[in-house]
Amino acid sequence: MKTSVLSTSTKETIFLTAMFAAWMALKRGSCGTSSQWMVQSFAFRPSVRQQRRATSSALSAKKAAGGGDKKPQNPFASTIILPETGFSQRANAVVREPEIQQFWNDYDLYHKLSEQAEAADAPRFVLHDGPPYANGDLHCGHALNKILKDFINRKQALNGKQVHYVPGWDCHGLPIELKVLQNMKSKEREGLTPVTLREKAASFAKETVEKQSQAFQRYGIFGDFEHPYLTLDPKFEAAQIRVFGEMFQKGFIFRGRKPVHWSPSSRTALAEAELEYPDNHVSKSIYVAFEVVEASDALKDYHSDESPVKVAVWTTTPWTMPANLAVAVNPELSYSVVNHVKTGKLVVATDLMDTIAKKLELPDEESFEVLVTMKGSELIGTSYTHPLYDRKSPVLAGGDYITTESGTGLVHTAPGHGQEDYQTGLKNGLELLSPVDDVGKFTIEAGEEFVGLSVLGEGNQAIIDALKSEGALLKAEDYGHKYPYDWRTKQPTIFRATDQWFASVEGFRDAAIKAIDTVQWVPDVGKNRINAFVSGRGDWCISRQRSWGVPIPVFYDRETGKEVLLNDSTLNHIEKVFAEQGSDAWWKLEEKDLLPEEYKDEADKWKKGTDTMDVWFDSGSSWAGVASAREELRYPADMYLEGSDQHRGWFQSSLLTSVAVNEQAPYKTVLTHGFVLDEKGFKMSKSLGNVINPSQIIEGGNNKKQEPAYGADVLRLWVASVDYSGDVNIGPNIIKQTFESYRKLRNTARYLIGNLADFVPEGEPGSTAVPYDELPSLDKWMLGRLGSVLREVDEAMNEFQFQRAVQELLRFTSAEMSNFYLDVAKDRLYISATDDFRRRSCQTVIQALLEGFAKAVAPILPHMAEDIWQNLPYATSSKSVFEGGWPSHLAMLKEHGSEKWELVRQVRDDVNKMLEVARSDKLVGASLDAAAFLYVEDDDKRKTLESLVGDENLIVPPIKTNGVDELRTVLMLSQVHIMDSAESISSSCNEKYISTSETSSGCIVGVSKAAGQKCGRCWFYDTNVGNHDHPHSDVCQRCNDAISSWEKTTGQTFVRPAITEEEQQPVA
């Protein structure tokens, strides 16, 4: 049986064991079994919150009632005051947390707090939610994200601000469209129209939103879930059209033909943020020689029809060879014409000659013969023939992207299949050739022998084989590198030139970079990341070839398909239509109904487009559709908070649209977190079987012994315990360790509540609180520590350093509260008379500790904090722990007696070490069996310790001390003696039980058996026990006084329980 609900540094203390045993024995008689007492119902009972709490006399009388078959082990148990509370040791989170959440909903806490803050004219705090995709179940990444947001929102609410948090969902795009298609049979898919697909996608998204919303709320997330924002809402879509329109009017939106990331598996263009780069991709790389047909002046002497020079290129995408229109060189690099019988004459970068020789596997100890070396600029003007087509192409100047890090130093250039290639082709007037269709197959432009072949499959190999048969292939080999994949289908993508709509970032790049400087980035490295992305970003391809999304509101000439109709009038009209009917109207209505009045007569000329907008444009417009559109919110928002991958995603798309339209960032602060990995640091995946489901942590698995239900607060404590600035780990062992920390916090709270059962706070009629100025030094020290901890936690949370806050709370509750203050407080809480000053002063401190603790943990562990508040055994001015704000009055408490009490704690540690030695030799059992003899050479320390030496015997009232600031009770020893010399300790203690002076306190410590007899009630040894004329000779004078007080309070006469013959027998 545990000695208390707290961990203690003196677990062997028999005194506490007997007290608790007696208490539980009495509880068995008055409240049923102890287990029943532990798990009694914890539903909210208004009577519990509103009624006046039991007085000390009622409390003691209840304990005196006794009952049951078993007798208390301590005959004085009925006069001892032990903790009493309905706050369960077990959280029973599966039941209790939903009850608390229902209380918040019934009480309308979210709106009530914002209304109270608004009435106080407090500033607003708006954390704008980044919308997760409404396409599946939640994972630990969602939990990390939403819980971090909740920490911040709840802390800002405690800071007194108007907190407005509107959860959002991204409802358009391919992820949802794919989910819909996966759930359909092939015949159903064949009959799909854009309208029916959109209806099914919308229905699926809304169902998923509801499921995810319930899960988020089960995490304890604080927000307006009744009025979320969905990107499919008509008003949101209309706001998105308005953003598009304003960017178009400023010249930032244009249509062009450029190479873009294209997903053959999804049949659509992709943005950079929609790509991922797996580590295990292997391409087939090739070295190819193009024969020169016209040599530059510098090459002429080395080139002839009989012995031609060839330009050597290297590529990891052989399928782009049909689109080759040039070879680019770096004008500043050095190039050489090299020769070998195996290869003929080749032009390569000088620095890569040896590498290429090895790649081409020249015979042992043979190398290239260098015929001439020249600058790249001297190669310009050369032309070559394509080995597969009757086509002559130039060697021209490229950019600084041409290096000698790999390849040959000459770059195969296909303007239709690469960004740098496109730019080079644009400067030199090259054609934009891209002989690949939407599904990634060669078109007729690639030649009859290749048409219909997949460029990522058999088509790639066919090109290699054709080059080999033409004698142009120098080498083919596997090459492992990072390659872009479609993040949804997990299939490789290609670069392909298509007609698309773009946002010209170049037009507002400088303004975007300037806006970045106005934002606080947490951590700081986030600023560098987004700066790099924005600085290096090309034009943003915003069009997608899918049905499920917000359409690009453009009309094309039916005959030519080239002329477009897009202006202020059409944009304003479409915005109004979407605001009323949603974007489905684009597919349901005819052109005449979508065009404004002045164009209706020519409706037959125009055909509406079928492209939809990039979903990053959707969510990137949320500042317009939500933050600036809702009255309770504001723009710019105070904070955006998402994963670190959003520097290239939502953070960036939101920044670009906001700067383009309003020339300002949409946020004031951006906080990012890492990814969630398993316990071993591996990425979670179903194939590895290492996926952790947040709901399983909360509700438990099928086997509750192996997969217990920990509740939402344990999940939240895990979030607070990790360094979210980088990747974080989670797994069964980590959660189990987190639960142990949670349990210690809960048990500390339970002990605090239990010792306030008969306490009446300051300001209440009949208050039993002790004014601060009258408190003992130890109590002031404890309050000072509380104030310091609250200031530290306040600062840490306001700086979003939740790990720091949790570590401080755990340290405080364990080291200073449980292991010291509350441990030594048991004597005055349990043994003192009900209204003894020592007891009431301690309760005064415990009330402050409890309320400070509840407020401090509330942002992180809201269910526990609320449970504490609802179980406070006295009336409070607020119904919820989140009302009334941060406990600033407690945080203002100053440090007191720090040096003195730090010395005492060090002495306590030193004494306990010697007690362990004595205990192992059976010299003593509990610490109260012992006496300590201390000597310290330092005069200041000596004076401090002497000031804490109490009366020789336990008397009431005490004379030398106040009975609290006393070494005897603080060290939990029956006697403490301050000695004049180190030698004098030896006369009282065996040398084996005497320390050296190398102790943490600097004291020499000796321990021995305590003098006198053991008090039958408090178990302190006292020389007066058995030698006084008080009613109960086998207890000390202090306990006699407490028994007398108990009799006066209860109106009963204490009668010692009868002892049976069995109890009189010696214990084996």
Image (spheres, helix red, strand yellow):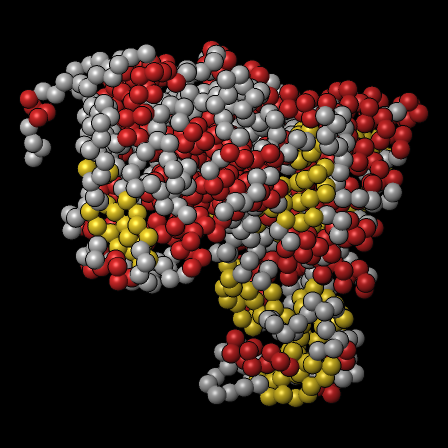
Nearer to me, 177 or 978: 978
Q: Quadrant of the N terminus?
A: top left
Q: Quick check: 1042 above or below 316?
A: above
Nearer to me, 377 or 5: 5
- Across and down, in percent, residue 78 comes to 27, 20
Q: Residue at x 59, y 60 (%)?
A: 317
Q: Residue at x 49, y 35 (%)?
A: 775
Nearer to me, 261 or 882: 882
Q: Is residue 171 visible?
A: no
Q: Is residue 1042 visible?
A: yes
- Across and down, in percent, residue 252 comes to 83, 45
Q: Is residue 137 left or right of residue 540?
A: left
Q: Residue furthest right?
A: 598
How many marks are shown on the rendered structure? 0
Nearer to me, 19 or 955: 955
- Across and down, in percent, residue 521 comes to 67, 49
Q: Is residue 742 left or right of residue 1007?
A: right
